[in-house]
Amino acid sequence: MSSEDPDTTASERKTLADLLAGNRDEILALLDGLTEEQARRSLVPSLTTLLGLVKHASFAEQVWFHVTLQGRTRAELGVPVTVDESFTLTDDDSIASVSETFRRVCTESDRIASEHSLDDTGDHHRLGAVSVRWMYGHMIEELARHAGHGDILREQILAADG
């Protein structure tokens, strides 16, 4: 087994944490080697860009772990109210700043989650009680979906730019 092979017999907690970490890595890798223009380039009618996907991933981490599980407010964290706003880029957003924010948010998410058992619950504004186990599953699903979106956008951008 190489150091990159998954631990396929790990505990449930480690398996969930490892799968989430892998998807986080995939989200960050979307920006590897791109210019700022490429990262911001819009190829679809929605607000989705590669940089916007990474920014949105920070939003999702915060909504689930920081707000739902830890009980902080979106206002306190500076988290947008709507999903669309989480994709919106400002002039100050850059590959470096958005990536660093994502890393910082994920580190905090891991700290928050580590203080709870998988059976502990947080209170979601729409769904009610959700377990830490469910939050892991949802974040794995969400980040995998967005990494796939990003892979397609990245492939199109790199092909167009030769």
Image: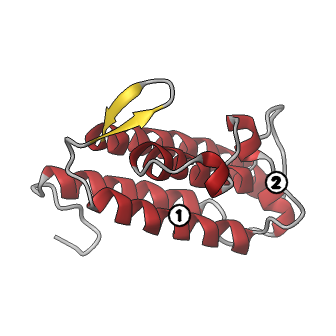
- Reading the image, the residue beneath label 1 is 105
For the N terminus, give its image quadrant. bottom left
Quadrant into which the C terminus falls: bottom right
Residue at 24% x, 65% y: name it: 5
Q: Mark 2 points at which residue?
A: 89
Badge number at residue 78: none
> What residue do we see at 69% from left, 65% from top?
98
Under tag 2, what secondary structure? loop
At 9% from the left and 55% from the top, the residue drawn is 9
Q: How far apart are marks 2 and 1 (CA)?
A: 17 Å
Q: Is residue 4 left or right of residue 117?
A: right
Quarter of the image where one finds residue 35? bottom right
94 relative position to 55: left or right: right
Type of residue at label 2? Leu
Number of marks in the image? 2
Instruction: From the top left corner, tell me how far across and down residue 110 is, in percent.
Output: 37, 63
